[in-house]
Structure formats: structure tokens, C-alpha cells
Amino acid sequence: MSEKIRNFTDLNAWKESHKLVLEIYRITKNFPREEIFGLTSQMRRAAVSVTSNIAEGFGRYSGKEQVQFFYISFGSLTELKNQIIISKDIKYISETEYRHIDDLITCSQKIISGLIKYKKNDQ
């Protein structure tokens, strides 16, 4: 039996992306102090933007508006992917951490893509 979605926190897209936010906060704690207003801040904002836009989209009445916010979430995931590549290349994160976060990003991208397709077909 499937559960009824009553809140944005019931969406798998939000749940999986929330895991990503928590991981980004965890790994950026270890970034150099001089990055607090640089890469650390950018990565945290991009990650939070993913879940925030899913939540905002959920709160919109029209499917078209919802899809717009889900697209913004997807864009934030792409931005975050760029930032984790940079973090790996400058040795702020290990290859293992990179692969783990990249897997979380890919998972969120797939679920959000499915949500977008569903909402577009539902219109």
C-alpha cells in the first residue's frame, strides 16, 4: 500500500536530497577555514537550494509552477556536482568521499527527473 503524500517531506526527492544536504555539511566541516565564505558556503547553499526548491514547488498550486521549482532543484544539483569535482581536484575531499557524494547527487537527479516527468504528464 502506498502512503499518501501530504507534505514535501513525504517526497522521495526531498528525502534523498536531504541526505545529500547532511553529507555536504558533514564534509565541508573539514574544509580549510579560508573557504568558509568560498567553496564551503557555495556548496552548502547549493545543497540547501535543492531541498528548498522541492519544498517550494510542492507548495505551489499549478503543475507548471511546481515543475519550474523542480527544474531549479535539478540545476542546483548540477552546480553542486561541479563544486564536488573542484573539491576533489584540490584535495579537500578524497576520491571515496567524491564517489559517495556523486552517487547521492545522481540518485537525487534521477528522482527529481522522474518527478518532473510525472508532473508534466499530469498537466
Image (spheres, rainbow, N blue to C red):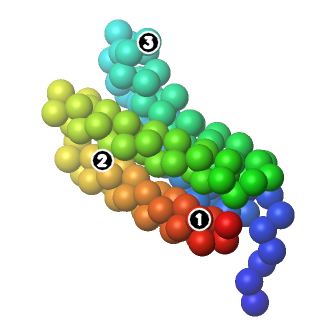
Q: Earlier in the sequence, mark 1 or mark 3?
A: 3
User: Which dot marks residue 11?
Assistant: none
Picture residue at 78% right of the left edge, 68% below the top: 5
- Which of the 4 image quadrants contains residue 15? bottom right
Q: What residue sits right under mark 1 in the picture?
A: 120
User: Observer-nearest residue: 23 or 106?
Assistant: 106
In the picture, measured across the screen, residue 90 lies left or right of residue 115, that is left
Residue 17, position as x, y percentages in the image: 54, 52
In this rendering, the answer to whether 69 lies above or below 29 is below
Q: In 3D space, how far apart are the residues under numbered discs 1 and 2 (Cα atoms)?
A: 34 Å
Q: Amino acid at mark 1?
A: Lys
Q: What residue sits right under mark 3 in the picture?
A: 37
Q: Secondary structure at mark 1?
A: helix
Residue 9, position as x, y percentages in the image: 72, 56
Q: In 3D space, how far apart are the residues under numbered discs 2 and 3 (Cα atoms)?
A: 22 Å
User: Which dot marks residue 97?
Assistant: 2
Q: In this rendering, which labeled residue sits more in front, label 1 or label 3?
A: 1
Q: Secondary structure at mark 3?
A: loop
